[in-house]
Amino acid sequence: MKIQFLRPDLHQIDRVTADTVVVSVFEEERPPRGVSGLMDWRLCGRLSRLMVGGQVTGRFREAVLLPAYGRLPASRVCAYGMGRLAEFSPARAREASWFVADSLHKLRTSSFVTSLPGSPLTGMAARPRMELFLEELIRVFGADETSGGVEAFIVEPAELHRDLTDAVSVAMRKLRVMWK
């Protein structure tokens, strides 16, 4: 598995090639913010319209698959409900991470663009969210011999990249020790 970090900037996101863009939506987060907001902007408000129409609610473990209409560096968009902001805990982050990873695996995703499940609004720091997300990605994709070619583009602010890269290094070292 290859992991790269991107800034939350459409110009940088447009430079990657992926088959799936993942967005996270909270129940009370209207309009969508962060990567979800950037993708909504690029989709001319399609995600917002689905939210207003009730097709995307943000309920926990909701999953909605949308075409990207050629407006994103991917052919499809997966919108995942994260539930209520106040209920987002480390346990919820782990379950959301597993749900996203499992869905992507079932879709046979070879590359995806996402922010970490959760939001800075939840009060949960990025590094613990990254560690939980990595654990679940490795658990789901690690059992598959084709997972070595999976590329994950994680969109988070540039000031977090060093700490998140360190979290990836630590997780990969642990994984290598387990397989020896």
Image (tube, rainbow, N blue to C red):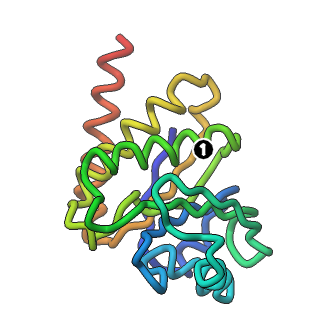
Q: Which quadrant of the rendered structure holds the C terminus?
A: top left
Closer to the camera in the image, 161 or 80: 80
Closer to the camera in the image, 108 or 99: 99
The picture places residue 159, in percent across and down from the top left corner, at 25, 71
**Toward which corner of the image does residue 49 lie, by quadrant?**
bottom right
Q: What residue occupies the far front of the structure in this picture?
A: 54
The picture places residue 41, in percent across and down from the top left corner, at 59, 87
The picture places residue 151, in percent across and down from the top left corner, at 56, 47
Identity of the residue drawn at 42% across and 46% down: 97
On screen, residue 121 above or below 81: below
Identity of the residue drawn at 38% across and 14% down: 179
On screen, residue 46 above or below 13: below
On screen, residue 19 above or below 9: above
Identity of the residue drawn at 51% across and 38% down: 1
Instruction: Using residue 170 as the reference point, say whether residue 15 is left or right of it.
Output: right
Closer to the camera in the image, 28 or 67: 28
Q: How many marks?
A: 1
Amino acid marked by disc 1: Ser
On screen, residue 165 above or below 65: above
**Toward which corner of the image does residue 168 lie, by quadrant?**
top left
Q: Residues within 10 Å of mark 1 (few under 14, many from 20)?
A: some
The picture places residue 46, in percent across and down from the top left corner, at 68, 82
Closer to the camera in the image, 63 or 134: 63
Q: Secondary structure at mark 1?
A: helix
Q: Give the residue at mark 1.
A: 103
Identity of the residue drawn at 31% across and 68% down: 85
Instruction: Using residue 101 as the reference point, say whether residue 146 is left or right of it.
Output: right
**Toward which corner of the image does residue 95 lie, by quadrant?**
top left
